[in-house]
Image: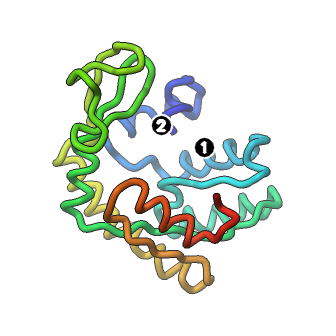
């Protein structure tokens, strides 16, 4: 989504307003973004969708997109963590305005506060990474996205993963959930 918004494609322009406010991108726009992306050659070898689908309607649309492109859906991962952990992780994120490098105030701080190690650019906090926006996103998640667990559980695709721990610990759990072929 952010790449399309930066590229200022027609679909990206529609997306950028929602992203800057921390709102969910409407289903019709989101589905089109995903459908376009999954047509790219690098998706033929496999792909991971992060943050999509978020609603049952999007999940249904994804099934059609995948079928139309001859792509299988092997697993649906759900990384579980308490809200306070999620808020701490997201509110500490910082992004470089120049090169897009990502940092975290606690878990991956830059050598010099507010300055990108890679290019020296200014680091900023995205509007949707502020605590009040995160809390609103978590409420929306409970209403609209949490039902996807049952949707994918019924299809035998849901893999729930403990999302608490270091990046390496969680990554290891993800690989275990996907099987050895995911490495």
Find disc 1 in the rendering and name its residue: 33
Q: Where residue 112 sits: x, y (%)? A: 23, 21
Residue 52 screen position, x and y as percent: 52, 56
- The quadrant holding residue 175 is bottom right
Q: Is residue 159 left or right of residue 143?
A: right
Q: Which residue is found at the position 46% from the left and 75% from the top?
A: 160
Residue beneath the point at 21% across and 55% down: 135
Q: Position of residue 7 (x, y in %)?
A: 56, 23
Image marks 2 and 1: residues in contact by CB distance under 8 Å = yes
Tell me, for residue 15, which label it has, or none. Answer: 2
User: Extreme bottom residue here?
Assistant: 154
How far apart marks 2 and 1 lie (CA) works out to 9 Å
Q: Toward which corner of the image does residue 163 lie, by quadrant?
A: bottom left
Residue nearer the viewer, 52 or 93:
93
Of labels 2 and 1, earlier in sequence is 2
Residue drawn 48% across and 73% down?
Answer: 148
Instruction: In the rendered view, tell whether residue 125 sits above or below residue 162.
Output: above
Q: Nearer the viewer, residue 83 or 170?
A: 170
User: In the figure, 162 relative to 116: above or below?
Assistant: below
SS state under label 1: helix
Q: Quadrant of the C terminus?
A: bottom right
User: Could you say which is closer to the camera, residue 16 or residue 41?
Assistant: 41
Assess disc 1: are there few (<14), some (14-19) or many (≥20) residues with their C-alpha within 10 Å of its C-alpha.
some
Q: Is residue 134 left or right of residue 79?
A: left
Going 18% across and 61% down the picture, which residue do you hit? Answer: 84
Label 2 CA crowd tier, 10 Å (few <14, some 14–19, many 20+): many
Residue 17: x, y in percent? 39, 33
Residue 142 numbered mark, or none: none
Q: How is the image coloured?
A: rainbow
Secondary structure category for the residue under label 2: helix
């Amino acid at each position: 989504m952010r790449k399309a918004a930066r590229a200022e494609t027609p679909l990206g322009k529609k997306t950028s307003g929602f992203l800057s406010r921390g709102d969910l991108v409407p289903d019709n726009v989101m589905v089109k973004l995903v459908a376009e992306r999954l047509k790219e050659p690098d998706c033929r070898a496999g792909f991971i969708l992060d943050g999509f689908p978020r609603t049952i309607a999007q999940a249904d649309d994804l099934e059609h997109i995948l079928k139309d492109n001859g792509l299988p859906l092997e697993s649906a991962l759900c990384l579980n963590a308490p809200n306070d952990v999620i808020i701490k992780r997201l509110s500490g994120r910082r992004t470089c305005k120049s090169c897009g490098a990502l940092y975290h105030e606690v878990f991956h701080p830059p050598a010099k506060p507010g300055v990108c190690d890679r290019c020296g650019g200014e680091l900023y906090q995205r509007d949707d990474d502020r605590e009040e926006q995160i809390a609103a996103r978590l409420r929306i998640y409970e209403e609209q996205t949490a039902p996807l667990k049952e949707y994918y559980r019924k299809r035998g695709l849901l893999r729930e993963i403990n999302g608490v721990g270091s990046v390496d610990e969680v990554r290891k759990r993800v690989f275990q959930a996907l099987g050895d072929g995911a490495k």
